[in-house]
Amino acid sequence: MSFRGLARTSLKTAAVVGAVGAACVGYAAAIEVRWFTLRRFTVPVLPPGADPLKVLHLSDLHLMPTQERKIRWVNELAALEPDLIVNTGDNIANPHSVLPLLRAYGGLLDLPGVFVFGSNDYWKPRFKNPANYLLPPQKQRHKPHGPDLPFEEMRHSFTEAGWTDLNNAKATLKVNGLRLDFAGTDDPHIRRDRYEDVAGEVDATADLSIGVTHAPYQRVLDAFTADGYPLILAGHTHGGQLAVPLYGALVTNCDLDTSRVKGMSSWGFEGRQATLHVSAGLGTSPYAPVRFACRPEATLLTLVPRSHG
């Protein structure tokens, strides 16, 4: 092939690659980021003979006041009639988002629920270099200024509705005749977690003990597992947000490996095992409103009895 022919071929190839890339960006920004889905998993963690328990896991809405489609979609989740709501944080992305958030949660606030906060319950999102997400977590810069989102208003609204605050706290709820013990931490991503406040072996008389945190950092997962929590729920990762088809996520935005970036997995530490569920969440930063091969999600976990033996 002549130099001129090779040049024409190269230009055509570049044009095709550019067109495909632009189409992918358009799809990620206009379609998938609003293509909400409900994941369902069955989790065998209850005592033998217990009735199934439906847990709705919500995370990372990053709600803006104008996101009416997301508000309606979340509001309709009440039709699932879950027994318990677990909210793992990053609810809002704007100082005026609390009332729209309460409208989104709607009837879910009438149900038993627990919550922890993430960094974007305290701080407004700001533009940052997307390459920062490729850095190790310890090299990322975190929020040097004081909180500027109405997290106390949101906390008050949740607790007034009956949800339980698990930020560095423990609690016990009776749900469908089962005793559920909880321990939670504030957001490990910004080092607000104080596991020492909730540390200690689980109570064997509980029907189930659940660990709850926003960001699934290994130090927190290890601590919950060492204390005997059989189920741990977290969010934060956005499922990687931009995934490569047939490969998966490139990053988790914490020190969790990418094989556990979303969905169900097992976590082991000091000879003990826990079931881990990481939600890919329902939103993004308003400065990076794209998702690719990683749909925004809520999850319905149906807890069932453990198998014998």
Image (spheres, helix red, strand yellow):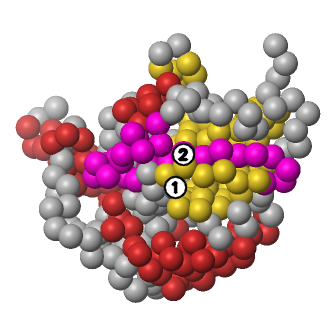
Q: Amino acid at mark 1?
A: Leu
Q: Which residue is mark 1?
A: 166
Numbered circles on residues, count: 2
Proximity of marks 2 and 1: CB atoms separated by less than 8 Å: yes
* Extreme-left residue of the structure: 3
Q: Which residue is mark 2?
A: 183
Q: Amino acid at mark 2?
A: Ala
Q: Which numbered marker is on residue 209?
A: none
Rendered residue at 44%/51% (across/down) = 168
Determine the secondary structure under disc 1: loop
**Residue 289 can be seen in this image:** no
Q: What stretch of residues is rendered in magenta?
A: 175-199
Q: Residue 284 lies in what quarter of the image? A: bottom left
Rendered residue at 37%/32% (across/down) = 219
> Dot 1, how many residues are within 10 Å of its Cα: few (below 14), some (14-19), or many (20+)?
many
Q: Nearer the viewer, residue 252 or 150?
A: 150
